[in-house]
Image (cartoon, rainbow, N blue to C red):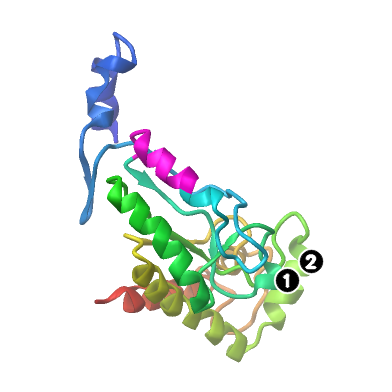
Amino acid sequence: MSILRKRVSTETKGGLDTMPVLFSEGIIGLLNLRSRWMRSATAERLANPRGIPMPQLPLLQTGLVRGSIGLSVSGYLYVSGKKNALPGMLAIDPDVCVDPLQQIARAMHTDGGQIPGQTNHEWMEPAPKIGPPLGKRLLSGLGQAGTTRCVATGGESARRCLKTGFAVVQTHSAKWPSGSQFLLLRINSRADERGRAMAGRMRFVREVCRKVRDGAEP
């Protein structure tokens, strides 16, 4: 990153037109990008109550690609528990959501862009409706069967993402998704193997990531 900053700083003295490095092709792992401009995951709120994208969303995504964005991350694909998801957010569960998302991915690929799928294990009430006391009750009340089911959705969502045509699966574990709630000591008061010490609190996220990798295998 420091090397990239240095290169950019030496090429920006004359303004935007002298920053060819940002508009040049880039590589992230196995992804070939048309440019190094990236749009991070954003809550577009352009899905209907079932989590299916509205017509405005493909227009937005393809417009970004045509404006030289090389990679645009989808915002918040909930994997289960629609009743706890934010209004207007996309779904990757159930399978009925795959075809509409596939149309977006195809349109972006046609214009030379890449779209990763950001999955969200939002089985709890999102902020600001939830605070640490309620979070503790929900987390401690989620039994082994419920936790196992949450983990399993990682692999299922990854398979749907690849079927959709998304280039990468990104697991969201910041802020209030269940992954971050397991990690936070002030919320995670579980006394089992997914609580207490840091290694235990990280177990849920690691299990989900393994399921995502398994689901992403060709």
Q: Quadrant of residue 132?
A: bottom right
Q: Amino acid at mark 2?
A: Pro
Give the camera-side residue of 157 and 199.
157
Q: Residue at x 54, y 53 (%)?
A: 55
Q: Residue at x 38, y 67 (%)?
A: 164
Identify the residue under disc 2: 133
Magenta span dominant secondary structure: helix
State the residue lying farthest toward the bottom.
145
**Secondary structure under badge 1?**
helix
Q: Quadrant of residue 208?
A: bottom left
Mark-to-mark CA distance, 2 and 1? 5 Å
**Numbered range of the magenta stretch:** 59-69
Q: Position of residue 11 (x, y in %)?
A: 24, 17
State the residue lying farthest toward the front.
55
Give the camera-side residue of 104 and 131.
104
Mark seen at residue 136: 1
Q: Quadrant of residue 209?
A: bottom left
Q: Position of residue 121 (x, y in %)?
A: 56, 69
Q: Residues within 10 Å of mark 1 (few under 14, many from 20)?
A: some
127 horizontally vs 8: left or right = right
Does residue 64 lie above or below 21 as drawn? below
Q: Position of residue 57 (x, y in %)?
A: 52, 50
Q: Position of residue 145 (x, y in %)?
A: 59, 91
> Is residue 91 within the magenta segment?
no
